[in-house]
Image (spheres, grey):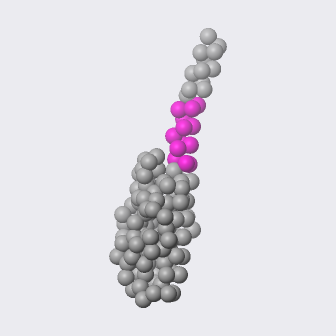
Amino acid sequence: MESLFCLAIIGTLMGMALPQLELQWQKTRRQDAQNSLMQLHLRQLQWRGLHAQYASTLSELNWAGTYSISKHYLLSLENSNAQGYILHATPVGLQSRDTNCSSMSLRISENAKVLATSNASLLTDAGTCWKW
């Protein structure tokens, strides 16, 4: 009887702890997107120093494939021109359960302003996903 009681307590504690643990893992994996987007941003700055416009593909930036460093996000590069570009990170696999930060973006505008956004918002980090 005591063993069953202990198992019930352990099960209850695990039921409370596991969701919080998964949320913490999601927050930790967001760093993968942030690090990848920032590395691509630095590569874009190097590229722009040598060319008339920003790179239009990830391969021009010597980025292997379309995934982030730890493969938790799918990366894409859009609207690349001489004035700016947009980098997107879309979660894949287990990270796709992160509904608070369903996507993260780094936007470089015409006046060279760096704008970090989330959840398909064009102007804000609505999900407070970016930690600078």
Query: Which image quarter: residue 66?
Result: bottom left
Query: Residue at position x 36%, y 63% from top?
Result: 120
Q: Which residues are magenta?
A: 13-25
Relative to 74, residue 2 above or below: above
Corner quadrant of residue 2: top right
- Where does residue 84 sit, x and y in percent of width and height? 41, 81
Residue 89 image point, x, y percent:
43, 62
Examine the rendered structure and indicate whether residue 91 appears above or below residue 118. above
Instruction: Please say whether residue 128 is one of the residues in the magenta stretch.
Output: no
Please identify the dominant SS of the magenta region: helix
Can you give x and y, in whole percent of width and height, for residue 81 in the image? 37, 82
Q: Is residue 123 visible to us here?
A: no
Relative to 130, 5 lies left or right: right
Residue positioned 51% across, 87% down in the render: 49
Residue shown at the point (40%, 66%) measured from the top left? 76
How many discs appear?
Answer: 0
Q: Is residue 45 above or below residue 1?
A: below
Q: Residue furthest top?
A: 1
Residue at the spot 60% in from the left edge and 21% down from the top edge: 7
Residue 92, image x, y percentages: 43, 52
Where the C terminus falls, by quadrant? bottom right
Quarter residue 74 falls in: bottom left
Is 120 situated left or right of 23 in this image?
A: left
Camera-nearest residue between 42 and 100? 42
Is 20 covered by the magenta stretch?
Answer: yes
